[in-house]
Amino acid sequence: MIFKNRSEAGKKLAEKLKKYKGNKNAIVIGLPRGGVVIAFEVARELNLELDIIVTRKVGAPMQPELAVGALTQDGEPILDRDFIEKLGIHDKDLEPIIQAEQDELQRRLELYRGGKESLDLNGKVAIIVDDGVATGATMRAAIKSARKLGAEKIVVAIPVSPKDALEKIKSEADVVICLDIPDVFFGVGGFYQEFAQTEDEQVISLLKNAANS
């Protein structure tokens, strides 16, 4: 399945989430940056509040796109120890990477929230949305963050994911909705006709528009 862009993917996801439409106990959570574009469409279609959880991928030394773990919103590293050992990576090599990602996470959290009070998911149905999953590291960090914030039920909604990553997510979320589980997976961007990088300004704009709608 190829999506035209993130907005189209968001509308398709919303169709699978109709049971939550207008549910005052549900909230849509976008993962910045690209996931917020999709989450905005989901929240608009379902008439739900939109908010964010900020996570960060921890990349391998010299291979930043290769995830060996991720950070939860409070900066806690969740590392794939088996994979790290397989790659022969030492903890001291990861320390500066983790510190840099913790700094970037805090920057984004402060920028995107813009003084808005901290997210409270106590007793809520958290619908966590991203533009796709590769390793599942950042989504799993988001799930852990949502649990810590008090979410009663966690629904993960994504357009595309490889099967192995999806199985890990299913073991940690309450409900998982994925539109496409391809046999061959070369990265999330390969399933979109348009997959431009989402900038900070767009994230902030979408959050403001959602709050005013």
Image (cartoon, grey):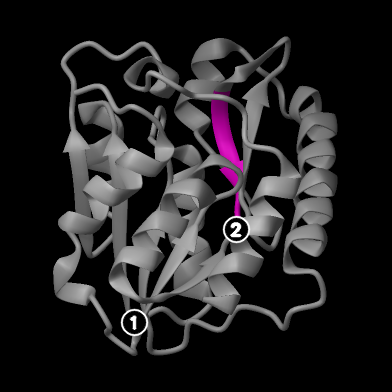
Number of residue marks: 2
Q: Quadrant of residue 68?
A: top right
Q: Would you name the residue on which mark 1 appears?
A: 152
Task: State which mark lies toward you, 2 or 1.
Answer: 2
Q: Residue at x 74, y 45 (%)?
A: 200
Judging from the image, what secondary structure is the residue with disc 2 in? helix
Residue 172, placed above or below residue 25 = above
In screen coordinates, is 1 left or right of 203?
left
10 Å neighbourhood of mark 1: few (<14), some, or many (≥20)? some
Taken as a whole, is the magenta stretch helix, strand or loop? strand
Q: Residue at x 41, y 29 (%)?
A: 135
Circles 2 and 1: CB atoms closer than 8 Å: no
Q: Residue at x 55, y 12 (%)?
A: 87
10 Å neighbourhood of mark 2: few (<14), some, or many (≥20)? some
- Callout 2 amino acid: Leu
117 magenta-colored: no
Q: Which mark is residue 206?
A: 2
Residue 109, placed above or below residue 190 = below
User: Is the N terminus in the top left, top right, bottom left or bottom right quadrant?
Assistant: top left
Q: Which residues are magenta?
A: 67-72
User: Separation of disc 2 and disc 1 at Cα?
Assistant: 26 Å
Decide which of 122, 110 is in the foreground and name it.
110
